[in-house]
Amino acid sequence: MKTAWMLALVSATGCIVGTDGEEADEEGGAKEVALNVKRQRYEQIREAARGRGMGNAFLLAGIANDETNLAMCWSEATWACQGPASPDCGGGPIIAGSADGPCGNQQGGLGMFQFDAGTYQQTIAKYGADVLTTSGQTRHAIDYTIWMVKVSAYTTDAETDDKARAWINRFDPNNATLRDQWIKTVVRYYNGCQPGWSCWGPRYQTYSDGYRLAISEPPGGLGFWGAAGGTRCGGSPAVVGEIEEKYLALGGCGSVLGTPTTEERGTPDGVGRYSVFERGSIYWTPHLGAFEVHGEIRDKWAAVGWEAGILGYPITDEMKTPDGAGHFSVFERGSIYWSPRTGAHEVHGRIRDAYKTAGWEAGSLGYPTSDEYAVTGGRRSDFEHGSITWTESTDSTSITTN
């Protein structure tokens, strides 16, 4: 993409922009790509978007439809230039734009989303080598889409990254106003054509066509894209991606969590994402997956610092203890136990190791009655029938029973 003005990165299609701001005519254009190949690309876009917590991925696919008809490899569109080798093209060349001059100049957009920072090598230097892969193209397209929705003059209540993501996730394809806002945003901020230029009408039409094709072409239509915007309970915010899958597995709107109360958000550490519900939360990270936390166990987790605290992210849903008397959740670096008679308390580190050796809550100690706390020379946790003390000087634990 080339910078034509302060906000818009012009010409994802590699169109030449003249000195009067008008687009030059393109040579060629997106040609037919085998339907089985397109269906595979639609699926790849959908799954990559889900992995980033984005629903309504047909919005992304509509852009790629207009740019290259979803062609990623030169072998699928030999009318275009040959770009650098791509592992997703069997080591063959990726599709490259041809409107920036002769192919020998090695300039123009790369891949199905036509990322363009000048020469091919400049584009790779800006976006990284993954711009030569389908997943990388989609990742960068997601980032760019969030940005353009955020800065768009046509969208409302989308002025931050989280709000822009929420705007995308609650997009209603049956809402003509939202469709118009989206197409105008794509034409102006993705393609770089501005209102009043001669390119505006034709570009609006072609991106509209690509959008409609992304909905109608995959088997199942909107159902292919995950019910078009995730799961809502009445007028609630949407739940999308792997968090949605977990929510539905728990029972959805009728589950222990209740109705969603926020759109999906990013965690402060930049690693994970979460959605909040009436009675709990679901947290997701790429390396752990999605797990729910609710009730007093969630309250305790909040008290010790959420995912940034001593326990880290959840790695299980809340579960019943074998004796049926309590519940517990396991986290990256510890556990929280709850029972009606003791409340919720965390156990972690070497003390948790000793608690495990002693038989957990079914052993001689019973349920924890305190969080870990400092004592002279070490740390201690109290239990119904005793305590476990860790001594710093010897890095050892000792169990005292009542």
Image (cartoon, grey):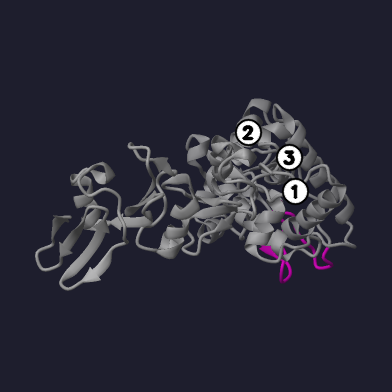
Give me the C-alpha separation between circle 2 and circle 1: 43 Å
Give me the C-alpha separation between circle 3 and circle 1: 39 Å
Horizontal side of 196 relative to 97 (left or right) equals right
Q: Secondary structure at mark 3?
A: loop
For residue 208, above or below residue 162: above
Magenta part of the chain:
1-21
State the image coordinates of residue 341 (x, y, percent, origin top left): 38, 51
The amino acid at mark 3 is Ala
Looking at the image, the residue that sits furthest to the bottom is 376
State the image coordinates of residue 52 (x, y, percent, origin top left): 56, 49
State the image coordinates of residue 32 (x, y, percent, origin top left): 72, 32
Q: Which residue is mark 1?
A: 235
For residue 369, above or below residue 243: below
* 6 in magenta: yes
Which residue is at a point 70% across and 52% down the rendered structure image? Answer: 168
Give me the C-alpha separation between circle 3 and circle 2: 10 Å
Compare marks 3 and 1 and give the one earlier in the sequence.
3
The amino acid at mark 1 is Gly
The picture quadrant where one finds residue 100 is bottom right
Horizontal side of 253 relative to 90 (left or right) equals right
The crowding category of the residue bearing disc 2, from other C-alpha atoms within 10 Å (few below 14, some 14 to 19, many at least 20), is many
Q: Secondary structure at mark 1?
A: loop
Q: Mark 2 or mark 1: which is in front?
A: 1
